[in-house]
Image (spheres, rainbow, N blue to C red):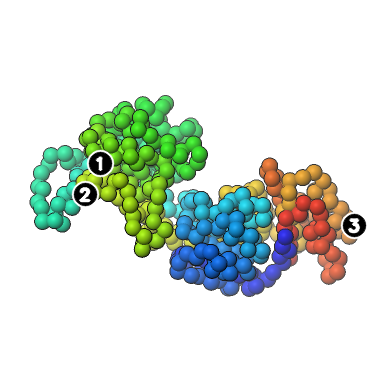
Amino acid sequence: MSNLSLAKDKIKILLLEGIHQNAVDSFKAHGYNNVELLPGALDGDELKAKIADAHMVGIRSRTKLTADILEAADKLMAIGCFCIGTNQVDLSAARDKGVPVFNAPYSNTRSVAELVIAEIIMLARGVPHKNTLAHAGGWLKSAEGSYEVRGKILGVIGYGHIGSQVSVLAESLGMKVRYFDIIDKLPLGNAAPCDTMEELLEISDFVSLHVPATPQTNNMFRREHIFAMKPGALLINLARGNVVDINALVEALDNGHLSGAGIDVFPQEPASKNEEFTSPLRGQPNVILTPHVGGSTQEAQANIGNEVTSKLVRYSDNGSTLGTVNFVEVSLPVQDGVTRFLHIHRNVPGVLSSINEVFSERGLNIAGQYLMTDGEVGYVVVDVSGDLEAGMGVRKGLAGIEGTIRTRFLA
């Protein structure tokens, strides 16, 4: 349990894995000057030592914040994943410590969508195979198996932020877009929904996957789906590595059922550039393999730096948890002439009445109060008007309530 009421220059922020300078600049613009930026990931005892006195930590995909690592982070009050995924964090362990986790689900949307379109065009023209031959001294100057994308049907599975932007870009090239999503989504442009994924697979010349990593999407695109695609179709996966049955994809490529694929994410990926990348897809002539770089552009990283930092700053300054992935979401008004107390606790009966008693016993007037709970954790924010004097014991009283995980006040 931790009670934090630190001035901004005392709040230590640790950023790992070469997070964009925008994040550092944004923190400093908001008065947070105690920022350490490291170029790579850390693990084991080195990570434990670094995180032990950090109040906020920012990571990308390679740093693993397990329950064991988080146990060493007694001062930690928030985590920022400067990427879309949060699989690298034990979200339950963080929540149990009263630590909200924030990510950037939207900032790299354009970068991913552009790469999808680029791969569709390259594959439709057979560029990967021709490129490999040219590097080896060959000269395959032929129109056989080479097509324009105009007029072709693109099937988008998962019509969220990325899938819908891929749809817009594809239509600008003259493609016809059909999509399938488990949730009803309003189509953009002339895109049209399919009632089933099977319907989409049967008619699409290209299929692009844009689904999140969930238990339902694990191995979602199996052999029966791959072989339900049109003969000669192309598959694009810039979503998650565990979505597609890779062995079934290899089979479909080997026997000519599919004419190519573009894959950016894999079931097993190297932990660093020094580790060999292995995949059954290596050596396939018309397959584009990219090392999980769908969102890896300078523009995307700059946007991510701004997006995640703004969420961390808002939580630190204001107590708002909007955008968290493991915690109750509360959007709070700006403080105006009040002292704000934050109380994170186990979701058990009687906590709210005990919190109110702490203030009433001291004759303090509650100007505003906000409560949200989930199955495990409750979050109470209390705005108190009037002058608080040293020695009143408000924080001690709040910390002493049974079930308390963490308390903090914002003067």
- Residue at the location (21% across, 49% down)? 128
* Disc ID at residue 194: none
- Residue at the location (22% across, 35% down)? 256
Kind of residue indicated by mark 2: Pro
Quarter residue 237 falls in: top left
On the image, the x and y values in percent for residue 327 come to 63, 49
Kind of residue indicated by mark 1: Gly
On the image, the x and y values in percent for residue 109 come to 42, 50
Pair 3/1: label in front: 1
Whether residue 121 is visible: no
On the image, the x and y values in percent for residue 188 come to 40, 37
**Crowd class of label 1 (few under 14; some 14 to 19; many from 20; radius 10 Å):** many
Q: Are marks 3 and 1 in contact (CB under 8 Å)?
A: no
Q: Which residue is mark 3?
A: 361
Q: Is residue 185 left or right of residue 98?
A: left
Q: Are marks 2 and 3 in contact (CB under 8 Å)?
A: no
Compare marks 2 and 3 and give the one earlier in the sequence.
2
Pair 2/3: label in front: 2
For the N terminus, which image quadrant? bottom right
Q: Secondary structure at mark 3?
A: helix
Q: Which residue is mark 2?
A: 128
On the image, the x and y values in percent for residue 31 come to 60, 70
Compare marks 3 and 1 and give the one earlier in the sequence.
1
* Disc ID at residue 260: 1
Q: Secondary structure at mark 2?
A: helix
- Residue at the location (86% across, 53% down)? 357
Label 3 to label 1: alpha-carbon separation? 71 Å
**Crowd class of label 3 (few under 14; some 14 to 19; many from 20; radius 10 Å):** few
Kind of residue indicated by mark 3: Glu
- Residue at the location (39% across, 36% down)? 221
For the C terminus, which image quadrant? bottom right
Q: Are marks 1 and 2 in contact (CB under 8 Å)?
A: yes
